[in-house]
Amino acid sequence: MDSRIPYDDYPVVFLPAYENPPAWIPPHELGFNIRGGKASQLGIFISKVIPDSDAHRAGLQEGDQVLAVNEVDFQDIEHSKAVEILKTAREISMRVRFFPYNYHRQKERTVH
């Protein structure tokens, strides 16, 4: 008897594909803002991209979830640690996915 679970019994989760925007060397400012982190349980998201910045030219957009920066996993990272990594990087290589659903959920959880 085959003890494997048939595919029909697995939960189905559809996540957007991730992208690897071109790496860039940040000038004195990053060209984008982030929000979220471990406390939100939803990850780090791009909350603003400055027009004509290197981040904008690399294709980042509001609602992108940052999955990794320079091979550091950003899916379960404190906000302050994410900022520190981004601000001290000499070059930025990112893996992101456009995930507006969780971005808006994260914004709703933010208490001002």
Image (spheres, rainbow, N blue to C red):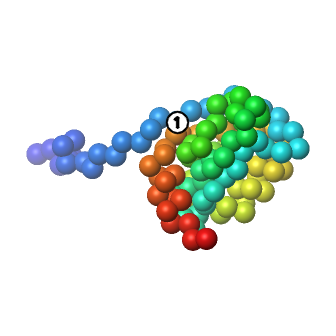
Q: Position of residue 30 (x, y in %)?
A: 79, 44
Nearest the viewer among 112 and 38 is 112
Nearer to me, 78 or 3:
78
Q: Amino acid at mark 1?
A: Tyr
Where in the figure is residue 22, as x and y percent of width and height? 69, 28
In percent of width and height, residue 76 lies at: 58, 58
Q: Determine whether 90 is above or below 37 in the image.
A: above
Q: Which residue is mark 1?
A: 18
Residue 78 in view of the camera: yes
Q: Quadrant of residue 61?
A: top right
Residue sitting at 11 percent across and 45 percent down? Answer: 1
Horizontal arrangement in the rendering, residue 57 relative to residue 27 (left or right): left
Q: Secondary structure at mark 1?
A: loop
Q: Position of residue 95 (x, y in %)?
A: 61, 38
Which residue sits furthest right? 28
The reply, left or right, for residue 1 in relation to residue 55 is left
Within 10 Å of disc 1 (Cα), the crowding (few <14, some 14-19, many 20+) is some
In the displayed structure, 91 sits above or below 75; it is above
Q: Residue 70 lies in what quarter of the image?
A: top right
- Residue drawn at 48 percent across, 46 percent down: 100
Q: Does residue 70 appear in this view? A: no
